[in-house]
């Protein structure tokens, strides 16, 4: 996606029209959609792992020790996934490209 950002910057310089709409359609929307899907998968992983861990705490339904270890691993990866998805959604890794100011456009 970072390579697409560079391509988009070149396209903005070559095309006319609303550059802000082009940036949002070509770069921003797919980036934020990817963040949303990643966040949903991470949330599902955390919820499933939490349910497994809660079931493991009951002595009647206690299973093999490896189940608890795998569930804790799922919690850790799910939390990391949620953090990455949030960072992508907030554009922390890379901000949207800015349209260069035209010398003919007045400031303001």
Image (cartoon, helix red, strand yellow):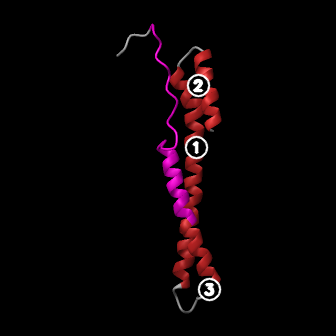
The verdict on residue 99 being magenta is yes
**Disc 1: CA contacts within 10 A as few (<14), some (14-19) or many (>=20):** some
Instruction: Return the x and y of residue 31 as percentages of the image width and height.
Output: 58, 40
Callout 1 secondary element: helix
Instruction: Return the x and y of residue 45 as percentages of the image width and height.
Output: 58, 65
Which residue appears farthest toward the top when viewing the image?
104
Q: Can you tell which mark lies on residue 33? A: 1
Residues in magenta, as a range: 77-104
Whether residue 3 is situated above or below residue 63 in the rendered picture? above
Whether residue 63 is situated above or below residue 39 in the rendered picture? below
On-image quarter of the N terminus: top right
Callout 2 secondary element: helix
Q: In this view, does 88 lie to the left or right of 63?
A: left
Q: In this view, does 64 lie to the left or right of 19?
A: right
Query: Where is mark 2, residue-wise?
Result: 9
Q: Which picture quadrant has residue 77?
A: bottom right
Instruction: Residue at 56% x, 63% y: name it.
Output: 78
Q: Earlier in the sequence, mark 2 or mark 3?
A: 2
Q: Which of marks 1 and 3 is nearer the N terminus?
A: 1
On-image quarter of the C terminus: top left
The one of 60 and 78 positioned closer to us in this rendering: 78
Q: In this view, does 54 lie to the left or right of 30?
A: left
Callout 3 secondary element: helix
**Structural distance between the alpha carbons of marks 2 and 1:** 20 Å
Instruction: Return the x and y of residue 16 as percentages of the image width and height.
Output: 58, 14
Q: Which picture quadrant has residue 76?
A: bottom right
The one of 28 and 58 positioned closer to us in this rendering: 28
Query: Where is mark 3, residue-wise?
Result: 65
């Amino acid at each position: 996606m970072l390579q697409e950002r560079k391509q988009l910057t070149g396209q903005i310089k070559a095309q006319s029209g609303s550059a802000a709409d082009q940036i949002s359609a070509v770069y921003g929307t797919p980036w934020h959609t990817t963040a949303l899907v990643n966040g949903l998968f991470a949330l599902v992983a955390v919820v499933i792992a939490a349910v497994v861990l809660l079931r493991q705490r009951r002595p009647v339904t206690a299973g093999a020790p490896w189940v608890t270890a795998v569930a804790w691993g799922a919690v850790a990866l799910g939390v990391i996934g949620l953090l990455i998805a949030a960072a992508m959604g907030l554009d922390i890794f890379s901000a949207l490209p800015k349209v260069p100011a035209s010398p003919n456009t007045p400031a303001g």
